[in-house]
Image (spheres, helix red, strand yellow):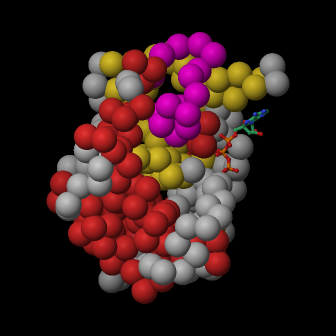
Amino acid sequence: MYQLTNVKVIRSERTILDIDELSIDPHALTVVLGHNGSGKSTLVNLLANQFSPEEGEVTLANKPLSAYGAKELAQTVAYLPQKLPEVAGLNVAELVRLGRFPWRGALGRWRKEDDEIIHNAMCETGVEEFKDILADQLSGGERQRTWVAMLLAQQADLLILDEPTSALDIQHQYQLMQLLSELNKRTGKGVIVILHDLNLALRYATHILALKAGKIAFTGEVDVLLDEKLLSDLYSTPVQLIDHPELDHKVAVVC
Ligand SMILES: Nc1ncnc2c1ncn2[C@@H]1O[C@H](COP(=O)(O)OP(=O)(O)OP(=O)(O)O)[C@@H](O)[C@H]1O
């Protein structure tokens, strides 16, 4: 379990994240929701040990994140930030290969299975055809999928993704969430993903974690989302849930 206890993150004398007690199942597909500025990126940054909180503690498997070594943490948690770094001079295959870094053998040697893992990660995300192209020359969506491929190649126990669908067209948004959902079901690897699209959340989440103004608004299995009042309060706008004749879940519309 991820466990947060009495956590406060303070920036410019303002508490931007304030969580008394929170557990996150490391084998679930948890979608993090909330309005702009509600603290979602701050939370997943903490979970990925990008920084430590000013107050409180974050543990994973009963061990403080700060006690993990860099290699151990990279084998345990793979993190895709919201703002993708520039990678001048690297083509797609070379960028995806960086995901294998935590698994290098003695003397920094690559392992013989690395090429197949990299190839599979590029195929699963549909970027294999771009493998020789410089990553910085790709379109926004192609670049985002390349970074997801790198994350997959990392083969960590848990994937944390901050708005990985923000640059993707509708088809690729659903394909990516389907891929993450299948990975979660097939391998038990955990996925924690920030989304703004309620319908992607309704379709693929097993668990929901919603933030409002730096605090937890609600958390639980995906059924907690099926509450128009909660959703309308969360986004300060009227949200309606309607049945869809061909889907086995409700659809959210803003009215
Ligand atoms: N370094 C910083 N200094 C001051 N304020 C900050 C800093 N980092 C974040 N904040 C503020 O903390 C709040 C939460 O930011 P965060 O990026 O976690 O929001 P978010 O929920 O991910 O938003 P979005 O949906 O827009 O990506 C915001 O109001 C932001 O302006």
Residue 174 in which image quadrant: bottom left
Most foreground residue, 241 or 166: 166
**Looking at the picture, how far across and down is residue 24, in whole percent?**
36, 34
| Residue at (35, 82) in percent of width and height | 245
Q: Would you say residue 227 is visible in this rendering? A: no
Most foreground residue, 125 or 105: 105
Judge whether residue 52 is colored magenta. Answer: yes
| Residue at (27, 67) in percent of width and height | 115
**Looking at the picture, how far across and down is residue 163, in whole percent?**
56, 57
**Looking at the picture, how far across and down is residue 32, in whole percent?**
50, 47
Left/right placement of residue 48 relative to residue 237 reads left
Q: Which residues are magenta?
A: 43-59
Seen in the picture, residue 176 relative to 28 is either above or below; the reply is below
Which quarter of the frame holds ligand 1? top right
Q: Quadrant of the N terminus?
A: top left
Most foreground residue, 156 or 215: 156
Q: Residue furthest bottom?
A: 129
Q: Residue furthest left?
A: 186
**Looking at the picture, how far across and down is residue 127, in whole percent?**
44, 79
